[in-house]
Every structure is written in C-alpha cells, then in structure tokens.
Amino acid sequence: MLGSKPRVHLYILPCASQQVSTMGDRGASNHSEMTDFILAGFRVRPELHILLFLLFLFVYAMILLGNVGMMAIIMTDPRLNTPMYFFLGNLSFIDLFYSSVIAPKAIINFWSESKSISFAGCVAQLFLFALFIVTEGFLLAAMAYDRFIAICNPLLYSVQMSTRLCTQLVAGSYFCGCISSVIQTSMTFTLSFCASRAVDHFYCDSRPLQRLSCSDLFIHRMISFSLSCIIILPTIIVITVSYMYIVSTVLKIHSTEGRKKAFSTCSSHLGVVSVLYGAVFFMYLTPDRFPELSKVASLCYSLVTPMLNPLIYSLRNKDVQEALKKLLEKKNISL
C-alpha cells in the first residue's frame, strides 16, 4: 500500500540548476511516493541568496506598509468616501493579499535547506494567486469605467456610479477571478507529474508546473489560451475604449488647468495598468527556454506592482496626500 511506504525526504544542493537536474534524475522512479514540490527559485550563487532575501524582505515590508496605509486612509477619511476610492481600497486589499500568497514562502526558502512546498500548499498558492491577479485585471477595467463616467458625464456621475453598481462591479471582479482560478488550478493539478517535482520558479505557477508533466498538454494549452483571451481581451477593450472617450473629452476642455486636473485623475490608473499588463505580457511572451526572464517578469507583477501602486496613487493624488497629512496630525496630537 502507498501509505506504508517510507516518506522520501528531499534535500537540495546549493545551486538551483543542480537542484533541478538532481530531482529530475530520480523523480521518474519515485514520483508516486513524493508529496512535495521543490521551489528551485532563482539560479544564482549561494552567496547572493542573502541579497535576494534582503530585497524580498524590503519589498514585502513596503507592500505591507503602503497597502495597509492606503486602506487605513480611505476608511478613516470621510472625504474619500467616493466610488474612485472604494475601488482603490479594494485594489490595495488585492495587492496586499496576492503578494502575501507568494512573498513569505519565497523569503523563507532563501534560508530553507529543503525549499519544499506541500502539494496542498502548491495548490492553494496557485489558486489564490490566480484568483487575486485576475480579479485585479477586472477591477482595473471597472476603475477605467469609473474615470470615464467621472470625466465624460460628470453631472450624472453620482447617479450612475451608485453604491450598488460599485459593489456589483467589485463582486463581479471577484466572481470572474474565482471561476478563472478554479478552472486553471483544476486543469493544472489533474496533470500527471511523472518526472521531476522541482518547480523552476520561486512560487507555484502553471507554466513551470506544466514543464514537469508527462501528460499531453495540447488541450490544456488551448484551454489556457482561450481562458487568457476571455480574461485579458474584455478588460483591455474596456480600458482602451474608456480612455479613448476620456482623451476626446479632455481635448475639448479649453482651460489648461481643467485639462491638467482631468489628466491627473487618470495618470495614476494608467501607470498601474501599464506596469501590470506590461509585466504579464512580457512573462507570457517569454519563450520557455528563458525561464529566468519569466521569473523577473513574475517578480514585477507579483511583488513590484503591489509595492508601486500605493506610491503611484499617493504621489499623484492631492486628496490622498491631504488625508495622509490629516491622519498624521491626529497621531501627533494623540501622542
């Protein structure tokens, strides 16, 4: 019986490339006994692990500080009780949680000898990350629509962007993310992992997991491509069409101050969209023979983007700056 067989303990050599090859040599014969995956991480010299550890730790600390701070500002200042900041608060929540799915485990693995992650942990990591990253894509499309209504139909803004509609847009974003995540995760973990269990990445992602499979991936890849198109194309179309109308409307504004104010409300959102989608496209367009480039792109949208989003919105937004100043003044008075 499978339960009576001794558990195989996996130990990793310092170099990640040796990890992958070593696991590959013995993975084919022992795949039925292994319950853990190995996160090989970055292929760097062992002495650079301390530098990567400090880098990941700094970025994650900034993510926690920035996104928790942004949510606190939005919840405590009544002036920010508007649809735009309702969406921004949800964006900070999503950034905080999907980075927390990846960063703590990646930080621990820089000091871990085994670098292992359980099968259930790998499933949970892929499911939660896919859930939040897809939700963010739809939420950014909702934010573009919000800016379109605010600039192109300002007199009807409070009527059209009602609390009910905003709640429905956010709930719909989570629903789409959940459905997509269920499909992607179930497809990935129904594959047969009959070779190495060493995932050539710093977290469980579908593409590096596919490389470990001996199943026929044609149908899997076709479904994944179709799912990506269903997710990415509508969000890009909504964002693009919204900004086409926004630019057309702004160009009709005669005053320079009016144009500047209108563009300033959109520039932060455009910056976030550009960083996220740029990194995603770069990762998925990178050939499999360049896994390190794919890891760098993954690092950008999994950790760098959640770190930059609060900075982009706070530096470009006077309302957030004033609310932060007011909050800090209250803290000083209480002290």
Image (tube, rainbow, N blue to C red):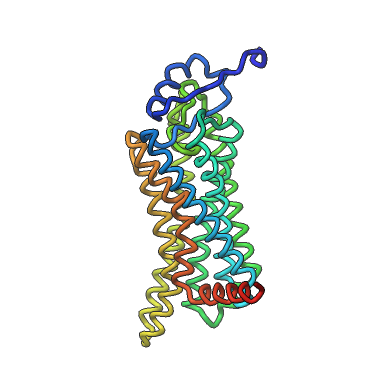
Q: Position of residue 227 (x, y in %)?
A: 49, 44
Q: Position of residue 136 (x, y in %)?
A: 52, 55
Q: Is residue 244 left or right of residue 161?
A: left
Residue 296, above or below 71? above
In this rendered view, identify the residue nearer to me: 10 or 110: 110
Q: Residue at x 46, y 23 (%)?
A: 196
Q: Is residue 111 left or right of residue 86?
A: left
Quadrant into which the C terminus falls: bottom right
Q: Is residue 264 left or right of residue 183?
A: left
Residue projecting furthest to the front: 335
In this rendered view, identify the residue nearer to me: 168 or 107: 107
Say whether residue 44 is visible. Answer: yes
Residue 243, above or below 6? below
Say whether residue 219 is visible. Answer: no
Q: Residue at x 64, y 71 (%)?
A: 76
In this rendered view, identify the residue nearer to me: 217 or 140: 140
Q: Position of residue 107 (x, y in %)?
A: 50, 42
All told, the count of numbered labels is: 0
Q: Position of residue 34 (x, y in %)?
A: 56, 21
Quadrant into which the N terminus falls: top right
Residue projecting furthest to the bottom: 255
